[in-house]
Image (spheres, helix red, strand yellow):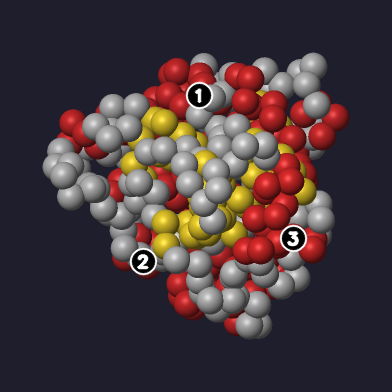
Amino acid sequence: MSHIIPVRKGEELNKEKLEAYLRKNFKDLPDSPLEIRQFGTGASNLTYALNIGKWEAVLRRAPMGPVAPKAHDMKREHQFLSVLAEHFPLAPRPFLFCDDDSIVGKPFILMEKKEGVLIDTDFPEEIEPTPALGKRISEMMVDILVKLHSVPYKGTILEKMTKPEGFLQRQVHGWIARFERVKTEDLPELEQLKTWLVHHIPTSPEPAIIHYDYKLNNALFSEDLSKMTGLLDWEMATVGDPLADLGAAMSYWQEPGDPLELKAGFGKPSVTTLGGFYTRKEFVKSYSKKSGRDVEHFPFYLSFGYLKLAGICQQIYYRYKNGQTNDHRFARYGEFAKSLVQYSWLTAFHSERGEL
């Protein structure tokens, strides 16, 4: 099962108001009291598991404290999931969107609770990791990403909600600006990296629906790990460059030979460092073969992926340092963001020398 914990201190919801709201908006709920727990993984939006007897749902809302403009847009995520429900059943089916801040403090969405096994830094005790299993999970991750990038968006509300033209340029400049706004110290590699990224933006392929936070611990699997049963955390989803989605995915995908500061940035190394899992190069090659997309410029996308992840981590660390969250997991994120900037620049540097 995905990692569900008691609600963290400072991130509690108003149980009475929420239960009254649920009973008003959902018919025939059991007489049992509302139970609220929290998903322990994830570092951005706050996600809660709700139970009233056998009735279950997931609630997502923005984090505590001030948030960046246009970030954590619950209405947008709800609309996105509504479109995906028709063509991509691995995404949770949305129930409703609520923009009344008085219920839980911020706008929120309620959605289906997907069941399955979450894999992150360890396999479940009853599962023996083998090279064959690592390869099978790697192939599933490639296949689902290729499938997502083939979901039609034209003729849906996503055409009006998104602007794929100029997507990559906006993303590069936008994430550079976001990092600059929240940086807590000067980083020597950052200026060189910014210049390199801005001057090496490739021409994007045809746009596609992208998850943009596609990683192993956002997926759920069947108990025997033979199939994916859910794909979670769609807050960054949009219509844009599918290779940017691939680059973001590979920024999370760790290899045995990666430096320790990269593998341990979130705590323990990912299971993708175990035998049998694809390397990033093998993952990208398989994606290219199955999707038909040219990956000649993938080193750029990987370098940008590391910068984007550095920006995400730095934003979270900035909130932690300024007392906007009490989650002590985030104390290490500042150092991790520095390492990611360094690795982003190394990726760019080796790309220039034809070593990738």
| Residue annotated with mark 3 | 103
What residue sits 70% from the left and 34% below the top? Answer: 80
Disc 2 marks which amino acid?
Gly
Marked residue nearer the N-terminal end (1 or 2): 1
Query: Gap between marks 3 and 2, in whole Å?
Result: 34 Å
Disc 3 marks which amino acid?
Ile
Q: Image quadrant for the C terminus?
A: top left
What residue sits 78% from the left and 21% below the top? Answer: 156
Marked residue nearer the N-terminal end (3 or 2): 3
Image position of 296 with respect to 326: above or below: above
| Residue annotated with mark 1 | 146
Q: Is residue 339 left or right of residue 166?
A: left
Are the residues flagged by discs 1 and 2 in contact, CB closer than 8 Å?
A: no
Callout 3 environment at 10 Å: few (<14), some (14 to 19), or many (20+)?
some
Q: Nearer the viewer, residue 242 or 268?
A: 268
Disc 1 marks which amino acid?
Val
**Can you name the residue that lies furthest to the right here?**
160
Splitting the image into 4 quarters, where does residue 157 fall? Answer: top right
Determine the secondary structure under disc 1.
helix
What residue sits 77% from the left and 29% below the top? Answer: 158
Query: Gap between marks 1 and 3, in whole Å?
Result: 39 Å
Q: Is residue 94 left or right of residue 290?
A: right
Determine the secondary structure under disc 2.
loop
Q: Nearer the viewer, residue 305 or 344?
A: 305
Label count reads: 3
Q: Is residue 280 visible?
A: no
Discs 3/2, front: 3
Discs 1/3, front: 3
| Residue annotated with mark 2 | 267
**Can you name the residue that lies furthest to the front here?**
31
Image position of 38 with respect to 223: above or below: below
Residue 54 appears at what percent x and percent y? 47, 42
